[in-house]
Image (cartoon, helix red, strand yellow):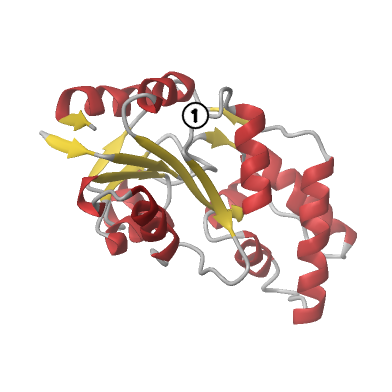
């Protein structure tokens, strides 16, 4: 049995299916700036590293200058705030979060801008069950740098070796490995089981309900 003191989640592709939401926002801005729009499949492969990385990767054939990129990112953030969110919580997530909220420390750590991360979580997950919701912040390195995750665990005074990080991408698995926490893959998200395993996932789950069953049977929640 694993004694677990904390569970931290990625957001996009783990708690919420935001792929269409992200695609709509990114393609709207790219189109307005004369860049080619991307398919949902292309966007899927780029999500996880943060907004700036996504835009840079999406425009390698016609890149923005640094000054243009800053303006595009500001426009994209404002566009995201304005349009109605098309995201939806994945099946089993609400039950999972409800199950965990009274048993252990619970957090969200995303590479999405922090204000956007908090907006999505507060809108889609009722009851505000998380002890902390963190996203990308100026002056703080994004995942896979483990600094933000380790700072969160330090605040909670919990042992990284007794912390589970659940995410759906290679970015999340690398973050977990570098932080010394238990890397768990969400195979319902944006990457395949093979990609998750190759990037360090110790356990991979096909659904949120299976992840919950594993927590109930294989761990002691503290």
Residue 161 in view in this figure = yes
Q: Is residue 206 above or below residue 66?
A: above
Q: Report whether 109 appears left or right of 185.
A: right
The structure residue drawn at horizontal position 44% and vertical position 41%, both measured from the top left corner, is 107
Q: Position of residue 91 (x, y in %)?
A: 48, 21
Q: Quadrant of the C terminus?
A: top left
Taking depth in this image into account, of 121 and 24 the one nearest to the observer is 121
Tell me if residue 199 comes above or below residue 204 in the rendering: below
Could you tell me how many numbered marks the image carries? 1
Q: Quadrant of residue 221?
A: top left
Q: Position of residue 182 (x, y in %)?
A: 25, 48
Quarter occupied by residue 179: bottom left
Residue sitting at 87 percent across and 65 percent down?
34
User: Mark 1: which secondary structure?
Assistant: loop
How many C-alpha atoms fall within 10 Å of the one at disc 1: few (<14), some, or many (≥20)? Answer: some
Residue located beneath label 1 in the image: 129
Up/down of 222 relative to 13, above or below: above
In the rendered view, does 67 fall on the left or right side of 191? Answer: right
Q: Decide if residue 144 is in sight here.
A: no
Image coordinates for residue 214, horizontal then vertical, percent? 23, 27
In percent of width and height, residue 117 lies at 62, 45
Quadrant into which the N terminus falls: top left
Q: Residue furthest left?
A: 1
Residue 184 falls in which quadrant of the image? top left
Q: Nearer the viewer, residue 50 or 107?
A: 107
């Amino acid at each position: 049995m694993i004694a677990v003191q904390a569970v931290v989640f990625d957001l996009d592709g783990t708690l919420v299916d935001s792929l269409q939401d992200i695609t709509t926002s990114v393609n709207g801005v790219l189109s307005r700036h004369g860049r080619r729009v991307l398919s949902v499949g292309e966007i899927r492969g780029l999500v996880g590293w943060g907004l700036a990385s996504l835009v840079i990767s999406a425009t390698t054939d016609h890149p923005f200058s640094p000054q243009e990129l800053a303006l595009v990112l500001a426009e994209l953030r404002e566009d995201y705030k304005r349009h109605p969110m098309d995201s939806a919580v994945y099946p089993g997530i609400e039950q999972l979060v409800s199950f965990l909220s009274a048993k252990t420390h619970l957090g969200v750590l995303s590479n999405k801008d922090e204000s956007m991360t908090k907006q999505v979580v507060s809108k889609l997950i009722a009851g505000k069950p998380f002890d902390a919701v963190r996203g990308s912040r100026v002056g703080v390195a994004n995942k896979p740098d483990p600094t933000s995750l380790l700072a969160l665990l330090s605040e909670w005074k919990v042992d990284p070796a007794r912390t589970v990080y659940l995410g759906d991408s290679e970015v999340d698995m690398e973050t977990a490995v570098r932080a010394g926490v238990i890397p768990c893959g969400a195979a319902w998200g944006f990457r395949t089981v093979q990609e998750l395993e190759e990037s360090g996932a110790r356990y991979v789950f096909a659904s949120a309900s299976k992840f919950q069953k594993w927590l109930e049977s294989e761990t002691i929640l503290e």
